[in-house]
Amino acid sequence: MERTIDQNLFRIAIVYFFLILVFLPLNKAMASQSMEAARELAAAGNFKKASVVAAGIGDAEGFAFAAASLAVYGYEIAEDSEMQPLFVKAIEYAKTAVELDPGSSEAYLQLAHTLGRYAQTLGTMTALSEGYAEQIRTAIDKAIELDPRNYQAYLSLGAWHSEIIFAGFMAWLLYGADEGESLDAYAKALEIAPNDNNVHFQYAVGLLKLDDRNIGQALRHLNIAAELPATDAYQKIVQEKVKEMLNDLERN
């Protein structure tokens, strides 16, 4: 009797083993297709739907992309009243991505990104007093440590320094923000991705936050950004911002 039970359990184990062998590649293929669908939705400007599809995949890559897409939707498209809850959800996605894959530079980048967007809804001084500067910097540093070629992490680092310097002298001293380090980070991002219009745009924004006298350099980067091709929805959003900023600077 015991031998029969053992044999049956062995057969069941064998069946499960082969089912895993069959369905694991299928699940990976389905995840890959869903990820591609999420990227296509985001490229077309459907950022909120892209976030839902990406989160549904259930892996670190999916949650990181969901965080990025939802943060873009919240910042660029959503009504002001929607922003905070959207950013809270985006932070949850990013934290899940980090938990699932602590070795993912992209996961830490999106944690910094989403925390930064949420902090912006609080106001600079409130965000600083509640410790967001430290949390964001820790996530940025980890993203760079894990992937020294992650140019978006360098953009975030440049912005971290420039935003704190722009906030005022006391914040500058308290958090150790440094103009030279900000410029070095922007330059590194540009070195890695010289044809990304957002790199030039963010570089220009950072230059002006650091010092109004940087307007010549800022205009050069804005003009380059305006000429670069915009092939997806986010690049087109950036392109419009570039044009608006150029118009504002020309009027002033």
Image (spheres, rainbow, N blue to C red):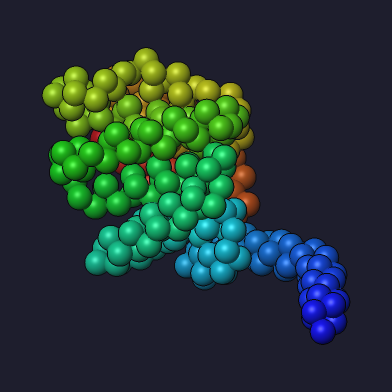
Residue 228 spot, x, y in % from top left = 59, 40
| Left-right relation of 210 to 223 | left
Q: Can you name the residue that lies furthest to the bottom here?
A: 1
Label total for image: 0
Q: Nearer the viewer, residue 82 or 32?
A: 32
Q: Quadrant of the C terminus?
A: top left
> Where 38 falls versus 229 (above or below)?
below
Residue 226, percent across and down? 52, 40
Where on the picture, by quarter, is residue 30? Answer: bottom right
Picture coordinates of residue 11 (x, y %)?
85, 76
Residue found farthest to the top: 180
Query: Which residue is nearer to you in this view: 177 or 98?
Result: 98
Q: Position of residue 158 (x, y in %)?
A: 40, 28
Residue at 51% over, 69% down: 52
Closer to the camera in the image, 30 or 82: 30
Q: Is residue 43 above or below residue 15?
A: above
Q: Is residue 218 left or right of residue 129?
A: right
Task: Give the camera-side residue of 202 and 90.
Answer: 90
Residue 68 visible in the shown view = no
Residue extending furthest front?
1
**Left or right of 111: which side holds 175?**
left
Q: Residue at x 38, y 62 (%)?
A: 89
Residue 128: image quadrant is top left
Q: Split into 4 quadrants, where in the image is the N terminus?
A: bottom right
Could you tell me if residue 52 is visible in this image? yes
User: Eyeballing the image, is 180 above or below 227?
Assistant: above
Residue positioned 56% across, 42% down in the render: 104
Above or below for 138 versus 70: above
Q: Residue at x 65, y 61 (%)?
A: 35
